[in-house]
Amino acid sequence: MKSLLLTAFDPFAHYTMNPSWEVVQALPETINNYHIHKLRVPNIFGLAPRLLLEEAQRVLDGGDWRGEPDVIRMTGMNSGTTKIDINLAALNIKDALIEDNMGRKPWNEPILADAPAAYFATIPVHEIVRSLRAQKLPVQLEFASGGYVCNEIFYRAAHAYAGTTTKAGFVHVPLLPEMVFDERLARPLEETSAILKAIIERL
């Protein structure tokens, strides 16, 4: 069985929940031939990618998930859409419009000095988007993953596993109905988790 490390974030800013973690928790432990290992990381620059990379290298109990994962699928929250955004690239920049959970707000700073300006996702982004849109599912291609902690964790994972067989990619999910005053600005948990599951099935 293959291994998939699936990450999500804790709440940040004024939010009391993060839909990425709620969606990840709703998924089964096995999808197709992937064993899903779930990890919640903090919305903190530097710490989130470090915890992800440590977990990716750790030998886990049970014997069926050891060493490097076959896929690292990261998820985060996008409050500006009701669609599921599948990210194409991570940029070597930290541009925070709001503070992280430690009060940090880096601006126009590189994630890694003397490293590539960007990394493309190594999962089949275009094929997944085309397949799911053909089924009328609310997904869209998002060219870059912003400048917040989502982008940093995506970039660091892509950098760490560049040139290896481990594939990496990022998905942004919308808000949940209980997080908004108008449910038209959100998408139910069951729908979003079903779409994330469909994405994993196409890896």
Image (cartoon, helix red, strand yellow):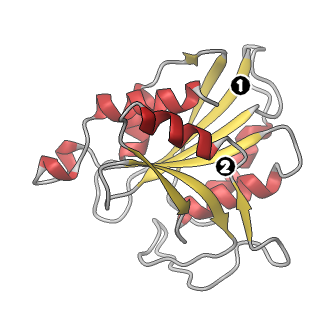
Residue at the spot of label 2: 51
Res. 3 mark: 1
Identity of the amino acid at label 1?
Answer: Ser
Which residue is rendered at x = 28% and y = 63% of the image? 14
Q: Which structural element holds mark 1?
A: strand
Label 1 vs label 2, nearer the camera: 1
Marks 1/2: CA distance? 18 Å
Which residue is rendered at x = 72% and y = 52% of the image? 157
Specify the quadrant that holds the N terminus.
top right
* Outermost residue to the bottom: 108
Which residue is rendered at x = 61% and y = 56% of the image? 88
Q: Is residue 12 above or below residue 173?
A: below
Residue 203: percent from left, percent from top: 64, 31
Residue 155: percent from left, percent from top: 69, 60
Residue 25: percent from left, percent from top: 43, 30
Identity of the amino acid at label 2?
Answer: Leu
